[in-house]
Every structure is written in structure tokens, then in C-alpha cells.
Amino acid sequence: MRLRVLSGSNVKEFDCKGGENLLGFLQEKGYVLSARCGGNGKCGKCRVRVMEGAFDGMRDGYVLSCMTSIAGDAAIEVFETEGGGLTKSIGERFCTDGEAGYGVALDIGTTTLAFALVDLATGEELEKYGVLNRQGGYGADVLSRIAAADQGKAPQLQASILEQTREALSHFCEKRGIARLKRLAVCGNTTMLHFFLGEDARGIGQYPFRAKFLHTVRKAGEALGLAVDEVVVLPSVAAYFGADAVVGGLVCDVESGVNLLADIGTNGEMLLHAGGKFLATSTAAGPCFEGANIECGTGGVVGAIDSVSLQSGSVAYTVIGGKEATGICGAGLIDAIAWMVRTGQIDETGAFADAGGKFRISERVYVSQADVRAFQLAKSAICAGLRVLLDTAGVTFEKLEHLYVAGGLGFYLDIANALEVGLFPKELADKIVVVGNTALAGTKQCLCSESRIAQAERLAAEAEYIDLSASPRFMEEYIENMNFGE
């Protein structure tokens, strides 16, 4: 059988066998389709347009690729996701041992990958870029990907991230004329690091939530098929508190006082320093802030609406890359919901004034009732986690010096809107500092300095992890913070 695939202006033809799952076939051929539900037919984001031929489940000329099989000769159009990723941060410092050569820092996010090429001698960043994590085709969050690995797809999950890493290393070397890279330093949440190294992540996905490793791992690049002398995977604290938040704590220097870092992505990882001690926790915010379970949601990529406002009574918005709006990312969603609350389109419970209503931002992009509900669950989890962590440490709002907000949400965030919708306690309004991708910045420091790696290891070892699932106070705060308004 022959399958012709159109993606943008590119057309390719492939031989295929009858009965093959269409999504799986396209993934194997290198197409990057979003399948945030893990291929269970729920999110609708892996749909393709049928130009010729027929598939089971066709509707209005489209079919969900995850739910159909190839049955004969056909031609389809796929809609690949164009990656951007948030790679910006503030407060970066040079920290280097003065070693000659070049290295790469990698932040493996559930949604995006961020790479940076660095001069090891000076700590200078020469180039960086972000791309969507192709593992998104196996599910939006870590649990869905762990389930996919348990179903026999662990090799594909590792191969996916390693192939994207090879592409980045090759790009840097070819563009800069670098013969050989000395080191690759890697951070990410604990599950992503397990997939990167090909380790069994099943223990993370089931009680009592134990990771196979948390310590720093050093390997020769050739052991992973990477053209780099050494690979250093940085340390984590617990199954749901990864190296990304650990090195973020270094960048923000949380140890310098009574400070709290909130790294917000699919999980909300929080690190508090008070009384000479580190307390860490995480809350399952879900993939809402990265667009995964939002009907028109997307990550921080080209085409995503990243801010929403009202101008002269009409909705105005900005789009990453300045192109046509194709979706909305977390920062834009917060803005949109804040305006929905202000204008009375939703009430304090989150219900639309008009049954079945939608807040339409552009011709293609809107916020639905289901989106608002997903957002309420996520923002309540973050706010409740912050309150309980501070309470556990005996730190009042007045005593806290800074709340550093990092992660995929943490550079373009409108603080006033975030406070209005209840993402953060309003008592912390004057404490918030938006810092962007501290994970990548911290990994660059560890790439260039053994002392920074040692500092990360000490932080990870000393941090006491607080399990919010065992906290009655967390559930009380979670329920109390669900609504909008006072």
C-alpha cells in the first residue's frame, strides 16, 4: 500500500502495511504530531485531513490518526507542531572552571526541550534554541508516558529524546565548526531523566512513587550514541522533584535568605529555604499550563497566543512569532480567564453566564467551559501547594523575601492577572519575581563548573521532601482556592 503525506509544502510517499496504526506509522517516519492523551482518542489533536482514500471514523474529511488504521492507498495532510520552547531567563551568572572547549546544556521538559551551546572557558552562551519534545506523541504528561513505556514503548521514548539531542549537537557543531564537544549537562524532571538514560520509570508512576535513581550520573557520550566526550545527568530530590528545580534553586540563590522557587509546568515543583533548611514539594498541576488538556491549547511555540487584553471593548492578543494564531499557551490562558472574570463572562464558580458559551479570542482560538474547569484545578493545586509549604516551614507571608516563578510559564507571565485568578496568594503580590527558564540557566552553570555540580548535589541531598497527598491541609486549601474572587 502507498501513503502520500503532505506536511506544509513537503510531500512524501511511503510503502506501508494494512492494519498499521496511522499515528504510530507517522511517528516512526519522523512526523511530529501532538497526541496529548497518549493516543486514546480524547484530545483530538492528532487529527489529519484525508485527501484521498478512506479511513474508519472519518468526519468532515478528517480522522484521528491515533484511532484509525491504514486500510489502503491514501493521501493525507498532517499538521505538525512547530517548536519554540521558552529558553529565556534572568539573573544568569558566569560560573566556570576555565576549561577549554565547548559544551551543551539540555533542559528536558515534558513539553519542550531547551538547548544551549556554551564556551566552557568563559561560560559565554553562544547559541540556544527550544523545540517541542517529540515524546508528546506518547502522552501529555509523565504518567501517560510511563504507561506507554509499560506497554512496550520505552525504547521509542528513549530513542526519541536521544535523536533530538543528536540533531541539536550536530546543528551546533556544523554551524560553529566545532570538531568535538566535551560535555553535555542534562536536567529535567525525574521521569524525563529516566527516559533519557533508558532506566525503568515504572516506580515513579505507582505508590510509593520511588525513582530508580536520584543521584548524579556520568556516562561517556558513546554509551548513549552521542557525539560528546561526557554526559552529566544532574541530581534530583524525589520522584516528582527533579534536577530542573534543583538547579533553578542555584540560579535564584534561594539559600541566601527566606526564599521560595516555584517552577511551574506539568508539575508545580516548589523549593523553600528557611531557617537554614531546604523544603521541597510538588503538586500535580496537570498539563494545563502547557496547553495539553486545553481545547485550543499549545505550548509556548510559534502561533501560540501568549497575551490577551481588552482594547476599546474588543479582545486583543499577541502571538508568538507574529504569525496567525493557532492556539493558546499558558500565559495567554491566564490572561484570557482574568478578562473573563472581569467582564462577567464567567462567575466566581467558573461557570459561563451563557450555557455552552465560549470566550472567543480569534477565529480559530477560544476558551471553553471545560478549559476553565481544567484551569481551576491546576491553579488551585499551585496556590494550595505554596500555602501548605510555607505553613509547614512556619514561614508567614511577611517573612518570605521572594517568590521566584520559573518554568515554561515563568517569563511572559502577567503577575496581576495571575494574582486575580488565584494562581498565587494575593498576600505575596510584592514578593513575586518572574525568572523564566532557570533550569537551563542552572544547567549551563553546572556544565562549566564542578563546584556548581557539588552545590546541586548538596542541595538535593539536604532537601526534605513534603508529600502533599498526605496533607489534610492541602486538600482544604485546594478546595477553598477553586473559585475566583475573594
Image: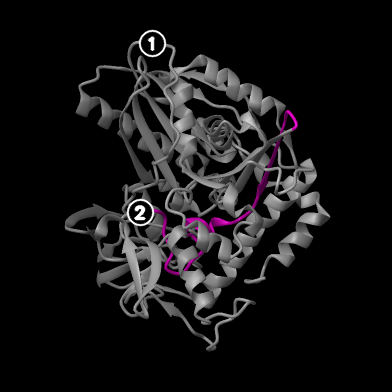
Q: What residue type is labelled 1?
A: Glu
Residue pictured at 59% horizontal, 25% vertical: 456
Residue farthest along the right direction in this orientation: 472
Dot 1: what SS? loop
Dot 2: what SS? loop
Q: Nearer the viewer, residue 53 or 426?
A: 426
Residue 297 forms part of the magenta stretch:
yes
Which residue is label 2 attached to?
301
Residue 161 forms part of the magenta stretch:
no
Residue 379 image position (x, y, % from top left): 60, 60
Q: Which of 270 and 370 is in front in this view?
A: 270
Q: Which of 293 and 8 is in front in this view?
A: 293
Badge 1, how many Cα within 10 Å: few under 14, some, many 20+?
some
Residue 246 image position (x, y, % from top left): 59, 33
Disc with the residue nearer the chain's start (1 vs 2): 1
Residue 265 image position (x, y, % from top left): 53, 50
Residue pictured at 24% horizontal, 20% vertical: 178
Side of 39 where 170 appears, left or right: left
Which residue is label 1 attached to?
99
Q: What residue type is labelled 2?
A: Val
- Disc nearest the viewer among 1 and 2: 1
Q: Is residue 342 visible?
A: yes
Residue 478 image position (x, y, % from top left): 72, 61
Q: Nearer the viewer, residue 32 or 4?
A: 32
Please state, as top left, top right, bottom left or bottom right, where the C terminus lies in the image.
bottom right
Please state, as top left, top right, bottom left or bottom right, where the N terminus lies in the image.
bottom left
Q: Give the range drawn in magenta.
A: 275-301
Badge 2, how many Cα within 10 Å: few under 14, some, many 20+?
many
Identify whether 482 is placed above or below 466: below
Res. 20 image quadrant:
bottom left
Identify whether 411 is placed above or below 173: below
